[in-house]
Image (cartoon, rainbow, N blue to C red):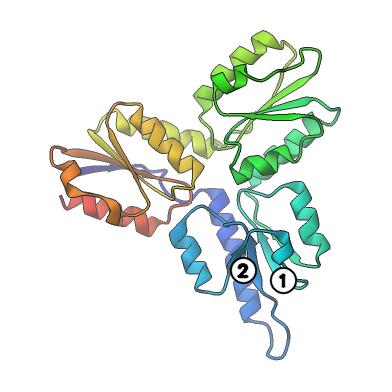
């Protein structure tokens, strides 16, 4: 089978930086002189959304905790690439842990932009997944009311006060075309709307490439963690072309029977997917 592999597939800049910071913390702990306390290395939530990567670091002694109450003074705490709520970070620092901020620079920029734009109490309208950790972190920086919505229908159901100032922003991995449509609809309601450009360029490039590849193949394979929002959106973008689209975490999940009538496959992957998993999927497809 012919395989068209996306050039943008795999780790983005934010993921690479986060894992570099974790690797540095591990190296520093390993070089601590004998007899000195090394301190535990913990991540507050999964550092990225990829189960294979998390398992690899767990084998090195890096454990993921879900609550700041699980931390101890002296722990090295790596803040996940998605960022964490501002109030949670304050609790982490207050417990005496050494904080290593591995928040993606694009997410950190969005957090600070929201803080500035809502400083006078404007209402934040955030396009994203309400239960996603990045979104929980973003809305924690709002100084006024905050509403999260995932579609035009959810936006229409919000009861908004036309007398208030409104700020529109987005989760960094959302689809830019959808965001533009939402922006147009909101500007008709609120001419003074402030719009923040918070969608990551890497996300846009990946989605555009996935859309382009999907238009020239008869099946798409998307490799990445099921908890990864940007990976799920790549699958959504590819499926819009009307072709069979398979979102898998590894090549082991692929079934040759589903590809029996296919001759040309497109392959891409989420921003937290290691190259080894993408290579394995490409080799599997090419062998059919």
Residue, x 74% and y 41% (percent of image)?
Answer: 140
Give the structural element (helix, strand or loop) at label 1. loop
Residue, x 23% and y 54% (percent of image)?
Answer: 284
Q: Residues within 10 Å of mark 2 (few under 14, many from 20)?
A: few
Residue, x 72% and y 10% (percent of image)?
Answer: 191
Residue identifier under label 1: 75
- On residue 24, the disc is 2
Task: Give residue 81's position: percent from left, percent from top.
Answer: 60, 52
- On residue 282, the disc is none
Q: Is residue 126 above or below residue 49?
A: above
Q: Is residue 214 above or below residue 104?
A: above
The residue closer to the viewer here, 63 or 283, is: 63
Task: Give residue 187's position: percent from left, percent from top.
Answer: 66, 12
Give the structural element (helix, strand or loop) at label 2. helix
Judged from this view, the residue extending furthest toward the left is 261
Q: Is residue 63 left or right of residue 227?
A: right
Task: Give residue 150's position: percent from left, percent from top.
Answer: 56, 28
Q: Residues within 10 Å of mark 1 (few under 14, many from 20)?
A: some
Task: Give residue 251's position: percent from left, percent from top.
Answer: 29, 54
> Gap in Å between the C-alphas at discs 2 and 1?
15 Å
Q: Quadrant of residue 118?
A: top right
């Amino acid at each position: 089978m012919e395989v068209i592999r996306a050039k943008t597939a795999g780790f983005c800049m934010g993921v690479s930086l986060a894992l570099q910071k974790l690797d540095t913390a591990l190296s520093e702990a390993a070089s601590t002189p004998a007899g000195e306390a090394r301190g535990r290395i913990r991540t507050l939530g999964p550092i990225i959304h990829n189960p294979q990567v998390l398992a690899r670091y767990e084998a090195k002694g890096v454990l993921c905790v879900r609550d700041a109450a699980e931390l101890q003074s002296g722990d090295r705490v790596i803040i996940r690439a998605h960022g964490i709520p501002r109030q949670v970070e304050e609790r982490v620092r207050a417990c005496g842990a050494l904080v290593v901020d591995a928040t993606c620079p694009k997410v950190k920029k969005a957090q600070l932009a929201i803080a500035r734009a809502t400083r006078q109490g404007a209402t934040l309208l955030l396009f994203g997944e309400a239960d996603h950790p990045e979104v929980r972190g973003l809305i924690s920086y709002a100084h006024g009311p905050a509403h999260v919505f995932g579609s035009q229908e959810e936006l229409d159901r919000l009861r908004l006060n036309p007398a208030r100032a409104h700020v529109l922003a987005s989760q960094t991995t959302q689809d830019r075309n959808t965001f533009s449509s939402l922006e147009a609809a909101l500007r008709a309601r609120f001419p003074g709307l402030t719009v923040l450009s918070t969608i990551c360029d890497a996300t846009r490039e990946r989605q555009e490439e996935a859309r382009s590849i999907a238009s020239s193949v008869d099946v798409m394979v998307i490799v990445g963690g099921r908890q990864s929002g940007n990976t799920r959106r790549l699958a959504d973008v590819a499926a819009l072309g009307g072709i069979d689209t398979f979102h898998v975490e590894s090549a082991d999940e692929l079934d040759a029977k589903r590809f029996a009538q296919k001759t040309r496959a497109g392959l891409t992957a989420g921003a937290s997917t290691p190259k080894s998993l993408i290579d394995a999927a490409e080799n599997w497809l090419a062998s059919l």
